[in-house]
Image (cartoon, rainbow, N blue to C red):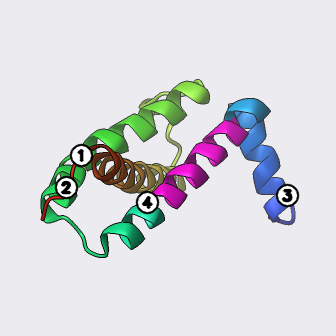
Amino acid sequence: MKDLTFGTILAVFEEIFGTGLFWAMVGVAVLVTVAYIYVLVRDRSISWRKFLLAQVSMPVGAIAAVWFVLVMTNSELRNLGGPVDVIVFLAIGVAGAIGTAVLVYTVQSLLLRRTS
């Protein structure tokens, strides 16, 4: 693989997760992002109580993201080959943590009454 293009990355992700699951995950990510922006615009401020609960949920999201990728790739942690693999898994964990925090904050804001 000489060139790393956007199309190549899409093809790799579709191969790992399957076309249907990959595009479903993209759709859910877009939906949650739009809902999060809606909540921020609607409330015009951040609820620090909801933000705290969202932060507490971040480790769960990080672990779930790493576990999900390990299951989808039929891998184990002992299969990590070097520093690049560790960096990729750290990035997956960070993405899972941030995604979970955004999801938890958004769900709280949509389902619960506004609190400061």
Asked if the residue under mark 4 is in contact with the one under mark 2, i.e. CB atoms within 8 Å, the reply is no
Q: Which residue is mark 4?
A: 36
- Asked whether residue 34 is drawn in magenta, I would say yes
* Image location of residue 80, percent across then percent down: 49, 40
The residue nearer to you, when weighing 48 against 91, is 48
Q: Is residue 36 above or below residue 12?
A: below
In which quadrant will I find the N terminus?
Answer: bottom right
Residue type, label 2 = Lys
Asked if marks 2 and 1 touch (Cβ < 8 Å), the reply is yes
Q: Are marks 3 and 1 in contact (CB under 8 Å)?
A: no
Q: Position of residue 87 (x, y in %)?
A: 46, 57
| Residue indicated by mark 2 | 50
What residue would you read off at disc 1?
112
SS of the residue under disc 2: helix
Query: Mark 3 is on which residue type?
Result: Gly
Q: CA distance from mark 4 to mark 1?
A: 14 Å
* Kind of residue sitting beneath label 1: Leu
Front position among marks 3 and 2? 2
**Disc 4 element:** helix
Mark 4 near mark 3, Cβ–Cβ under 8 Å?
Answer: no
The residue identified by callout 3 is 7
Q: Nearer the viewer, mark 4 or mark 1?
A: 1
Q: Which residues are magenta?
A: 22-35
Left/right placement of residue 36 relative to residue 108 reads: right
